Amino acid sequence: MAEEKGFEFLEHTADAYVAAYGKDLAEAFERAAVAMFDVMTEVEKVEAEVEDNVKVQGEDEFALLYSWLEDLIVKSEVNGMLYSKFKVLKIGKG
């Protein structure tokens, strides 16, 4: 099942702990976002109705992932929406 979804929940005492996988970094980021929202709700039941753009920066891959997920959480809270599908168009320098 983890391979199907591209992520799995790992045991952790206090937080949601997720391992996300992908054929490349962009796909792993997409799957990490799905996993994050899957903690909040059943994402397969969330219909994608709105398209939004997110642009983030980070000093390394870890900071970039943190910024990406943080921005999605903020947008979700501010707009009162849940997201269920993601497409990372580019990960690069500059």
Image (cartoon, rainbow, N blue to C red):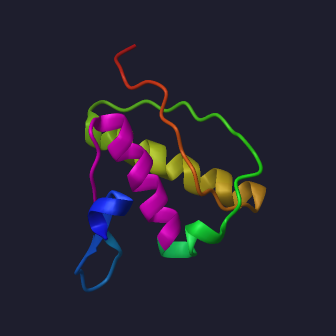
The part of the chain drawn in magenta is 19-38
Residue situated in front as seen by the camera: 68 or 43 = 43
Across and down, in percent, residue 77 comes to 68, 61
Number of marks: 0
Q: Is residue 11 left or right of residue 66?
A: left
Residue situated in front as seen by the camera: 35 or 79 = 35
At 38% across and 61% down in the image, what residue appears?
5
Instruction: Name the quarter where the N terminus is drawn.
Output: bottom left
Q: Is residue 37 magenta?
A: yes
Task: Give the main secondary structure, helix, strand or loop, of the magenta stretch.
Answer: helix
Q: Is residue 44 left or right of residue 2?
A: right
Q: Is residue 31 left or right of residue 75?
A: left
Q: Is residue 15 above or below residue 69?
A: below
Instruction: Name the quarter where the C terminus is drawn.
Output: top left
**Residue 58 occupies quadrant:** top left
**Residue 7 occupies quadrant:** bottom left
